[in-house]
Amino acid sequence: MTTSKPNWIFCVAASVTIAVAFSGRLAGQTAAVGSSLGSSGSGTEWSVQVERIDPGQLDLAHSFQVAIYENLLDELNKTKQFKQVLREGDSKASDLPNLLILKTTVVKYTRGSETQRAVTTVSGATKLTVQSQLLTRDGKIVLDRTVQGNVRFFGSNLRATHNLARNIAKVIKQSAWPGSERLARNSPANSDRGRHTSPAF
Amino acid sequence: MNRLRVVRNGQCRFFVRRVLIGVCALWLSASVAALARGAAPALKANQPFSIRATHVVGLPNTKNNCKGTLSAQDNVLRFRQSGKAVAQVDIASVRKVSLGEESMQIGGLPMKIGKAVAPFGGGRVVSLFAHKKYDTLTLEYIDSDGGVHGAIFQVTKGQGELVRNELVARGASSSSGEDQATKQSTSEVTHDDK
């Protein structure tokens, strides 16, 4: 009776030790995989410079243009896809070797009304459609997508700009472009951990 | 009869004289008021101003959609929350100030819930009247690195123009064609040059 109790305690202690040791090892492996994707991904960490919103031929309010621009900077920072997210005109951009430029042109805009949305539910949506392009310094297009941002039920008209910026950031994150996480995961270069791939453009 | 005519002529002259004096007094007061109005901005130009505003987006280290006070003093535009300056912009670096007009539903989340649970579509009727117009003040300015920043504030209707004029008087540049864009009717506008 007296010998069984220490045995039981020893078993529990041993199992806890093994569990802790294995979980630490697994976490270490996950971290290693994550860091390898981040560092070798496409070989280089890219920065992005966001240009001001081009309203095209549309009479888009200045507040909407500014709101898209500012929300876009916020959302791109949140994705952690880029080493640095710079504003248009930032002098630091000239020192960065791997820089992409994000151009956003408004293609379609439907001005809605919050009151109309609240009264009718089905009408009064504010809709924004933009063409987003990621370009290199020399003007080569890396990514070209048309993205929408709407506010249909609740929220002010400016909320459409927030939704749009979030969608643009999501598209950039999920698309396969040289330097993106997705391409980094799928590229054969990742199977060879020691190899450091050069940028494709 | 002649006596009556003389009395009437005397009254008429007296009346004309009073009218003339009245017109002169009116003209004098109007010109003084005009002079005072013309001189007022010059007097206010260097005086600090302060208004309640909601920061929508753009200022660094400031939460979106937070209420505070927008003030200008010594050529610096400050946004304060509970007395503390959370962000400031050098007015000389502001290169575009524009004014817009928006309408929003009032009451916030409690009102939304109330409208949703109101029977027989009563909430929709409430929505028809529970909205408020306000001015949006949009600034575009340059930071020390040359980067372009934007900031949007909501202010009480009518105050936006005062702030814009104040900023322009202190050295910011203004854009004039923005108001039309924000006041356009609800219509779909497309641009197909892809």
Image (cartoon, coloured by chain):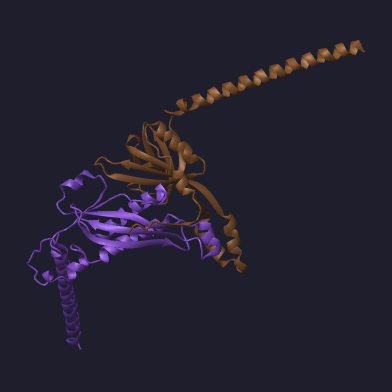
Residue shown at 57% from the left, 55% from the top: B130
Specify the farthest residue to the front. Answer: B193
Specify the farthest residue to the right. Answer: B1
Judging from the image, what is the letter of the chain drawn in brown? B
Q: Position of residue A167 (x, y in %)?
A: 34, 62
Against B44, residue B116 (above or below) is below
Against B26, residue B74 (above or below) is below
Task: Write down the colour of chain A.
Answer: purple
Q: Is residue A4 left or right of residue B123?
A: left
Residue B5 or A71: which is nearer the viewer?
B5
Tell me the quarter of the image containing the C terminus of chain B.
bottom left
Taking the image as drawn, is residue A103 in sight?
yes
Taking the image as drawn, is residue B86 in sight?
no
Q: Position of residue A172 (x, y in %)?
A: 27, 62
Q: Position of residue A84 (x, y in %)?
A: 22, 53
Q: Is residue B113 left or right of residue A151?
A: right
Which image quadrant for residue A189? Answer: bottom left
Against A179, residue B78 (above or below) is above
Residue A198 or A54: which is nearer the viewer?
A54
Residue shown at 36% from the left, 53% from the top: A68
